[in-house]
Image (cartoon, helix red, strand yellow):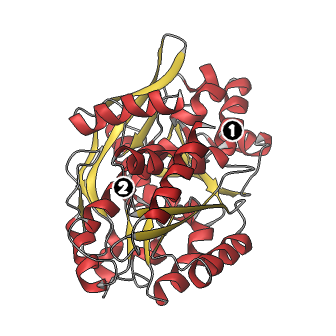
Amino acid sequence: MKLKALALASCMAALAAPAMAEGVKVGMITTLSGGGAGLGIDVRDGFMLAVNQADRKDIEVVIEDDQRKPDIAVQLADKMIQSEKVDVLTGIIWSNLAMAVVPAAVAQGKFYLSPNAGPSQLAGKGCNPNYFNVAWQNDNLHEAGGAYANTAGYKNSFILAPNYPAGQDALTGYKRMYEGELAGELFTKLGQTDYASEIAQIRASGADSVYFFLPGGMGISFLKQYADSGLDIPVVGPAFSFDQGILQAVGDAAMGVVNTSQWNKDIDNPTNAQFVKTFQEAYGRLPSLYASQGFDTANLLMSAMDVADINDAVAFRAALQAADFDSTRGAFKFGSNNHPVQDIFVREVIKEGDVFTNKIIGTALSGHGDVYAADCKF
């Protein structure tokens, strides 16, 4: 109820603003039901927290649920562009939905600010000056996983991910940095919940480590089944499978697991400390990396609005590129393809009281961009 009240207050205030001449109408299409809903809810909550804390009466946010279905996402985007007349789109979690929506949206002159999905196709040859990713390029956290595996001395990794754009980017990213051999490589079904067959293959493979990318409920199922199997092969993954939103569901099976992330609640800067505190106060839970990404996306948008009119696309684009805002990650900048250049950390799952969470134990990659920027020609 509190969230609905905040969103309604924001929308009502925006409608009351005179003529919206210098205001911005935002269309947020994200996953709010079914599998993966927690990710979209966190992005939405982080975004709205920033807007409401700033008391921006010049922002109107229209929020819709894509149900994790590409056809629904496309319909919602068409409605928002044609009927709602939004200026900016944001919110998509899943890369297959981003590929269905983003190219058409930016081709119509709309700005798209991604708080999550970062498919390689939109970072390289398919880049667009109106598309900005505020989270990462899909490969990045997995590249960090490969770099960590080298320092940990792993020589024979078994790797697996769902068969969709982000899963393909994940394993590509891991292999780009990883210097050892592969005991096996598998693509699983998106939304799969039974991993008995995959675990049997891992058992028989002779692997000395397992790297997996299985976000949301997929990761919960895999980790629980892996723990129950009795296998003692070390597991490494990206933050998506060890994030605050799912750790409680995974429980003891996640304890001590190393994972990679560009954000954590213990990053030591005033903006992050305040974000973690106020998010807990507003929503009664610790924030996830998805919430931090939504929060940063809103602050990027507001920083551009402070210096440029949305109707002046050239000036607004330059203001976004400047990224003059206080990020939860500390220093933040875009590369030449409008994707972040940032540090990626190594985290370990711990328990604080009754709450499972992560702590930073090192840095896997510093000032890291993405390899696709070289193919991006604006």
Frontmost residue, 108 versus 120: 108
- How far apart are the two marked residues, 2 and 1, measured between alpha carbons? 42 Å
* Residue beneath the point at 23% across and 65% down: 306
* Residue beneath the point at 52% across and 77% down: 102
Report which residue position mark 2 lands on.
Answer: 56
Q: State the image coordinates of residue 363 (x, y, percent, origin top left).
A: 27, 40
Rendering quarter of residue 267: top left
Q: Nearer the viewer, mark 2 or mark 1?
A: 2
Rendering quarter of residue 275: top left
Residue 153 located left or right of residue 98: left
Residue 95 located left or right of residue 341: right
Q: Is residue 179 above or below residue 223?
A: below
Q: Earlier in the sequence, mark 2 or mark 1?
A: 2
Residue 279 located left or right of residue 272: right
Q: Secondary structure at mark 1?
A: helix
Q: Looking at the image, can residue 15 be seen?
A: yes
Q: Amino acid at mark 1?
A: Phe
Report which residue position mark 1 lands on.
Answer: 222
